[in-house]
Image (spheres, rainbow, N blue to C red):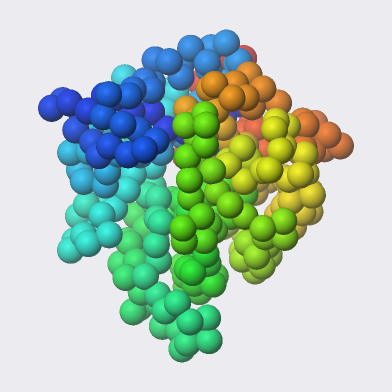
């Protein structure tokens, strides 16, 4: 049975061949290569993985993502980005997906009214054309939106029930100004003990086209691995979504140093110790490849 790491990032040093934006997480001279990740895959029997674009949304800034998918077509699929000010998002999406391997797009903003009591017309959302085109072309949409946009998700999912939607990182929607970088160079998101993200995810449980990534625990937990303060959150997601709509992921490379990739392959066993083998197989990926669109047949374990 295949084991799939459903969300991670790779990037090269900034160069003419692989242009990208730099950031606190990925300065210009840092690289986290596909080859480094493949070594972890081989060591820990991971068969396939979803590479999520980092370093800019322009077509040229996807060069390294494209390179990695082309170099390892049986191992990797990709999630691209769409510029927030893109005049022709449909053309941008098709240009990235047209060469194969890039199967969807990550959105950090939905572009609707911030007032949850405002009249809602999804056709007026800034992201409407992206959703409409995803529905037409069967692209996945990977959502990691801020808290101010969280109430808008259900309206779009309701309007486009055919679009496969993935809620990133436990379905959390970080508040503005809550993002920092910790001592290990990892994202750190300040969240309250009782996260209002529960209300967002609960509203979406009735939609069969919505799945949730069990990832990013290190960024939200106030404890060291295995992040036991998030055990209740995982149990709630399992109860509400069921194992077939939960997806394990590491969010590498941020976890390479602390706690280490090997430990992260065990995080589900630590936080959901009572799940059945069938449920574990669902979450780790054996039954979820069709949702991502991974080709069959690539198994090294």
Q: Quadrant of the C terminus?
A: top right
Q: Is residue 224 visible?
A: yes
**Residue 146 in picture, x, y percent from top left:** 48, 61
Q: Residue at left 46%, top 58%?
A: 177
Query: Viewer-proximal residue, 295 or 274?
Result: 274
Q: Is residue 85 left or right of residue 141?
A: left
Query: Viewer-proximal residue, 287 or 104?
Result: 104
- Name the residue furthest right: 274
Q: Residue at left 53%, top 86%?
A: 117
**Residue 274 in picture, x, y percent from top left:** 86, 37
Question: Residue 10, relative to residue 136: is it above or below?
Answer: above
Q: Residue at left 38%, top 28%?
A: 10
**Residue 239 in picture, x, y percent from top left:** 79, 54
Question: Residue 226, relative to residue 74: is it above or below?
Answer: below
Query: Viewer-proximal residue, 16 or 52?
Result: 16
Q: Quadrant of the N terminus?
A: top right
Q: Is residue 216 left or right of residue 86?
A: right
Query: Viewer-proximal residue, 195 or 274?
Result: 195
**Residue 208 in picture, x, y percent from top left:** 62, 59
Q: Is residue 121 left or right of residue 272?
A: left
Q: Residue at left 39%, top 35%?
A: 25
Q: Is residue 171 visible?
A: no
Question: Residue 133, relative to residue 31: is it above or below?
Answer: below
């Amino acid at each position: 049975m295949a084991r799939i790491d459903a969300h991670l990032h790779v990037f090269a040093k900034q160069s003419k061949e692989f242009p990208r934006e730099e950031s606190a997480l990925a300065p210009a001279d840092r690289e986290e290569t596909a080859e480094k990740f493949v070594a972890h895959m081989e060591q820990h029997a991971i068969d396939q993985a979803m590479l999520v674009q980092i370093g800019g949304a322009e077509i040229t800034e996807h060069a390294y993502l494209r390179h990695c998918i082309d170099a390892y077509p049986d191992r990797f699929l990709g999630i691209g980005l769409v510029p927030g000010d893109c005049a022709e998002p449909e053309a941008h999406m098709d240009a990235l997906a047209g060469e194969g391997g890039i199967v969807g797009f990550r959105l950090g903003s939905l572009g609707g009214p911030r007032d949850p009591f405002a009249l809602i017309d999804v056709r007026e959302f800034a992201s409407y054309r992206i959703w409409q085109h995803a529905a037409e072309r069967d692209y996945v949409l990977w959502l990691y939106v801020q808290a101010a946009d969280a109430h808008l998700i259900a309206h779009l999912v309701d309007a486009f029930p055919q679009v496969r939607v993935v809620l990133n990182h436990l379905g959390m929607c970080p508040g503005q100004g809550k993002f920092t970088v910790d001592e290990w160079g990892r994202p750190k998101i300040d969240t309250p003990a009782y996260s209002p993200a529960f209300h967002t995810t609960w509203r979406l449980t009735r939609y069969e086209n919505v799945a949730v990534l069990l990832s990013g625990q290190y960024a939200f937990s106030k404890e060291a691995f295995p992040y036991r303060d998030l055990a209740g959150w995982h149990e709630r997601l399992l109860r509400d979504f069921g194992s077939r709509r939960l997806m394990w992921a590491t969010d590498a490379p941020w976890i390479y140093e602390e706690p280490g990739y090997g430990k992260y392959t065990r995080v589900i066993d630590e936080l959901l110790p009572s799940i059945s083998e069938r449920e574990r197989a669902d979450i780790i990926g054996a039954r979820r490849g069709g949702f991502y669109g991974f080709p069959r047949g690539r198994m090294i374990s």
